[in-house]
Amino acid sequence: MPVIKTESGPVWLRRTPQASLRLWAAWFVFVALTVWCWLVMTKDTIWYFVTDAPQQAADIGSRMFPPRLSYIEKLIWPLWDTINMATLGTMLGVAIATPIAFLAARNTTPSLMIARPIALFIIVASRSINSLIWALLLVSILGPGLLAGIIAIALRSIGFVGKLLYEAIEETEATQIEAVQATGASGAQLLNYGYWPQIAPAFWGISVFRWDINIRESAVLGLVGAGGLGLQLQASLAVLAWPQVTTILLVILATVVFSEWVSAKVRHAII
């Protein structure tokens, strides 16, 4: 911390003049970059529609209430499809992500130069693409339906589960692994008695947490043809049936709240 000597005694400065100059220069660059980004993002904006947005929102909101509760009867099977899509997609994603996590972890990978980079690439590739994009691609390849949604959920889950799980594997206690190895245990026995007891709480917690997230994501995959509640939402939006849209949104909200409650209870019981 710099000091300036005066007649009344030393004065402590928070920063040197050079540090203050660099700080102000950084702020200037940040503000200039923010202004430039704002100009780029809004260059094609029609501000009339922006100023008219509150009136349009109020008009649509008035049409959405009261919700058409009788429409819930037609949402039972789509809701069941949504839950199945999330559950099966999560199970498939976890099944694929688990061996990938062991390949990515430094203490379990068979090759730091080949297997680990490949596993990390798969994890990053999965996490970098949203499930909605996966669903768009898969609907184009497989056609509309739940299968495309299930695979899209699984592909998105691989990166999430794989990353958290391989980090949990790398944090395992080495002494316990060495004790099991000292008994002459096979590779399968080492996984079963050395690694699994240490990572089991993290494994189940991660799986349930991902299932909770997938419930939310699967609810909207139908917008691109993957089935479930999203498909009903798309159909209602297409015909401007706003009371039905409100009902669907309420069902989605109730489903997400229920899945959050189940997820919290299961994680609390496991961990």
Image (tube, rainbow, N blue to C red):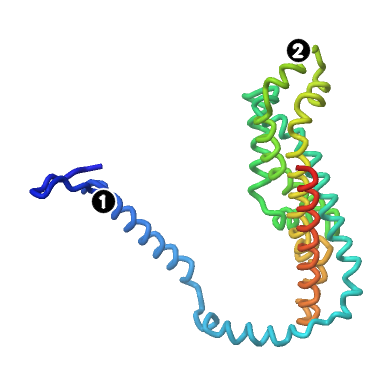
Asked which quadrant contains residue 232, the reply is bottom right
Q: Amino acid at mark 2?
A: Ala
Query: In this rendering, is residue 268 above or below 165?
Result: below
Instruction: Name the residue nearer the viewer: 7 or 182.
Output: 7
Residue type indicated by callout 1: Ser
Compared with residue 94, is residue 80 higher up or lower down, i.e. above or below? below
Q: Position of residue 33 (x, y in %)?
A: 39, 59
Front residue (pair 52, 69): 69
| Image quadrant where one finds the N terminus | top left
Q: What's the mark number on residue 197?
A: none
Q: Secondary structure at mark 2?
A: helix
Q: Nearer the viewer, mark 2 or mark 1?
A: 2
Residue 243, picture quadrant: bottom right
Could you tell me residue 50's position as x and y percent?
53, 80
| Mark 1 neighbour density, 10 Å: few (under 14) some (14–19) many (20 or more) | few
The answer to the question of whether label 2 and label 1 lie on touching residues, with beta carbons closer than 8 A, is no
- As displayed, is residue 102 above or below residue 221? above
Residue at which label 2 appears? 182
Classify mark 2: residues with Cα within 10 Å, few (<14), some (14-19) or many (20+). Answer: few
Residue topped by disc 1: 20
Residue located at (22% from left, 43% from top): 2
Q: CA distance from mark 2 to mark 1?
A: 60 Å
On screen, 249 above or below 138?
below
| Residue at the spot 73% in from the left edge and 43% down from the top edge | 158
* Quarter the C terminus occupies: top right
Kindly identify the residue that appears in the image at 75 percent across and 64 percent down.
220
User: Left or right: where does residue 72 sit relative to residue 16?
Assistant: right
Label 1: which secondary element = helix
Q: Residue furthest left?
A: 7
